[in-house]
Amino acid sequence: MSVDTATVKRVAKLARIAVTDDEAKNLEGELNTILGFVEQLNEVDVSNVEPMVSVVAVDMKKRVDEVTDGNKAADIVANAPASDENFFQVPKVVE
């Protein structure tokens, strides 16, 4: 895959970056070099590589999947200026 100046300008516009024509030419070369390195990854044989979550073989910690309220209601309203039975109290703003 090759990137041309028009593509560089389009990507810059999407990223909301102002790019001059000279900068676009420089970025075109840099992006093509980066894409060349990425294409080299396609040459690596990964057919015998098992998908990993981590580079170290570790079993994932699992918890019981149960629905709770978090048991944190009192902690959540602890810093509120006013609360009543774990609910925030706010002044009336609509009459």
Image: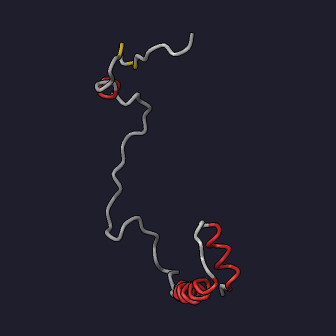
Near-viewer residue (73 or 15): 15
Left-right relation of 88 to 7: left
Near-viewer residue (14 or 35): 14
Left-right relation of 9 to 56: right
Based on the displayed image, in which of its 4 quarters is residue 22 positioned? bottom right
- Find residue 75 and report its horizontal and vertical position in percent: 29, 28
Near-viewer residue (72 or 88): 88
Question: The N terminus lies in which quarter of the figure?
Answer: bottom right
Near-viewer residue (71 or 53): 71
Which residue is situated farthest in the top direction here? 95
**Is the residue 27 above or below the residue 91 in the image?**
below
> What residue is drawn where x is 36% and y is 18%?
86
Based on the displayed image, in which of its 4 quarters is residue 28 positioned? bottom right
- Find residue 10 and report its horizontal and vertical position in percent: 68, 73
- Find residue 25 and report its horizontal and vertical position in percent: 61, 88
Question: The C terminus lies in which quarter of the figure?
Answer: top right
**Is the residue 45 above or below the residue 60 in the image?**
below
> What residue is drawn where x is 66% and y is 87%?
2
**Is the residue 8 above or below the residue 52 in the image?**
below
> What residue is drawn where x is 50% and y is 81%?
46
- Find residue 53 and report its horizontal and vertical position in percent: 41, 64
**Is the residue 85 above or below the residue 18 in the image?**
above
> What residue is drawn where x is 34% and y is 17%?
82
Colouring convention used in this rendered image of the protein: secondary structure
Please tell me how many numbered marks the rendered image carries.
0
